[in-house]
Amino acid sequence: MFPTPKVVKVHDVKLALLRHFLLGLIFIFIVVFHIAYRGSHLNVTPVQGVVRVQLRDPSEDSCDPFHMNCSLGFESMSKLPYCQQNNYTGVYQKECEYWDSVELRQMTDEGLLIPTRVLTFMQRERCHPSLANDWSCNGTLYDFIDSNGEKQSEDSQPRPVRDVFVADVERFDILLDHSAHSQSTTYTGDGTKAYDFEMLGAWEACEDNSKSEPENCTEVPILCVHEKCPPGSALPPRDPDSTALISAKAWAWLRAWTRPPPTGEDAEPHDGPYKKKDSYETMEPSEEPDLVDEFELADYWVRKNRVAATTKGDLLTLSKLIQTAGVTLDGNVTHGAGETYRKDGFAIVVRIEYSNEVPWLGLQVSPWKPTGPTMFYKYHVIPHSTGDVKFRKVDYFSDKDKHQVTREVEEFRGIRIVVEQTGAIKVWDTMQLMFLVTTTLALLAVASCILDTVALGCMSRSSEYRRLKYETEEERPWYSSPRERPGETHASP
């Protein structure tokens, strides 16, 4: 017996509706949902990045404190409860000092360390290898000494000659300048890359970041304040009455930008630093480009607890970073020493996640545009409160008359900022599309099986449909043979 397919056209409305319903489900599931909406036919390419973390002073008018005539905006020590200069007598109070970003920024292998507490130890050389001691040393190399040069007792913990808090450290700004690029593949050519000011960004804040799966997270778009904002960026309000800036220069800038251009033949030229356009992307500089300073607008919104995007990076206050991590410098206690974070230090992990996955991604990725839409990123802040976050720096001093070497060891404890860059983008992949087409063929076979099962076992005429579908040689009528038809006789050979 040789089985061969047979096509039977059955005129049944119910079966026809079931067939079109199953085909419609397959079309919606594969073409609409997986290909057009989710982009399941695309390949996932990992993303790598480069980041630069910079510390900015809380200066007035966004000036550089390293230049002359630049004023800093620190809070008075008499108003800071952790300072001894305050009348409040607290347990954790210490003498405070003002530091600027030049001395505050401590770069380590594990990230940027922003000191909140500084301890200074003085040590004197104890070991002097020579022929008399066989060029060896027993015990410690240095003795701890006090401010008077006297050796400290070895039966107690070494006492620093200086132990201070850095005043108003939360007011400093953090500038995150980063970029991302995908690896070169056969589908994307040389890959794709983008800088932070070319991408849309968001800041994610969660109620409890200590859990592996943070809950009740809210994404706030990063406010774009520069002239190269990508489409879809969150822009600052344009009403000057509700967004008065912190300086007269910035106020004049915003007023000139929002004032409509003059009309008429006798009207004077527009004297503002920007000509009014529809958005930041189309603003054009006027005759006074020296008034243009995006950091003035960024500083205003940063003081309102927002994250602002500039062409130099994303700007936010250190207090915003600590608040997003869900900790306080004077309230939380480290696991190791049981001290406050301001006294013992802790770490903050800033995770930057990149992606280009958006709804209806499959319609935006094609062989002619293999990398799809521009990447976007999201910040997620995670505290790492193990305590004992410190960094030491040494300066040596030599006394030639006494043939003695002393050294000053500065120990910095504070906030260590570690930045992680992760993510992936979806790119065009022909082989992945072929795999999805194979899945479609399998679903069509399943639909055909369901339709046959219903037709041959669940319908009132199922026996007739079964006889038409599976016809054998024995079931054919005797007159179906061309040699034996009614009304015809054939002679025997």
Image (cartoon, rainbow, N blue to C red):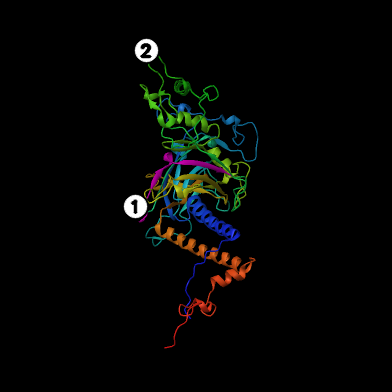
Query: In the structure shown, which secondary structural element does the residue marked by tag 2 occupy?
Result: loop
Q: Is the residue 481 above or below the residue 48 in the image?
A: below
Q: Which residues are magenta?
A: 184-205
In the picture of the structure, the residue carrying the numbered disc 2 is 265
Query: In the structure shown, which secondary structural element does the residue marked by tag 1 occupy?
Result: loop
Q: Residue furthest left?
A: 190
Please tell me which residue is depicted at 49% across the width and 32% down the height of the picture: 235
Q: Is the residue 362 above or below the residue 453 in the image?
A: above
Indicate the position of residue 375 as horizontal and vertical percent values.
44, 45
Indicate the position of residue 182 as horizontal and vertical percent values.
40, 51
Is residue 261 visible from the viewing direction of this image? yes
Q: Residue furthest bottom?
A: 493
Q: Amino acid at mark 1?
A: Gly
Please tell me which residue is depicted at 50% across the width and 30% down the height of the picture: 236
Please tell me which residue is depicted at 49% across the width and 70% down the height of the picture: 6
> How many numbered circles are shown?
2
Point out the tag, 1 or 2, that comes first from the N-terminus: 1
Is residue 164 visible from the viewing direction of this image? no
Indicate the position of residue 471 as horizontal and vertical percent values.
53, 74
The quarter in which the C terminus is drawn is: bottom left
Between residue 205 and residue 319, name the one nearer to us. Answer: 205
Indicate the position of residue 240 as horizontal and vertical percent values.
51, 23
Between residue 463 and residue 449, name the one nearer to us. Answer: 463
Question: Residue 189 — which label?
Answer: 1
The CA distance from mark 1 to mark 2 is 54 Å
Q: Is residue 196 magenta?
A: yes
Q: Amino acid at mark 2?
A: Glu
Q: Is residue 280 magenta?
A: no
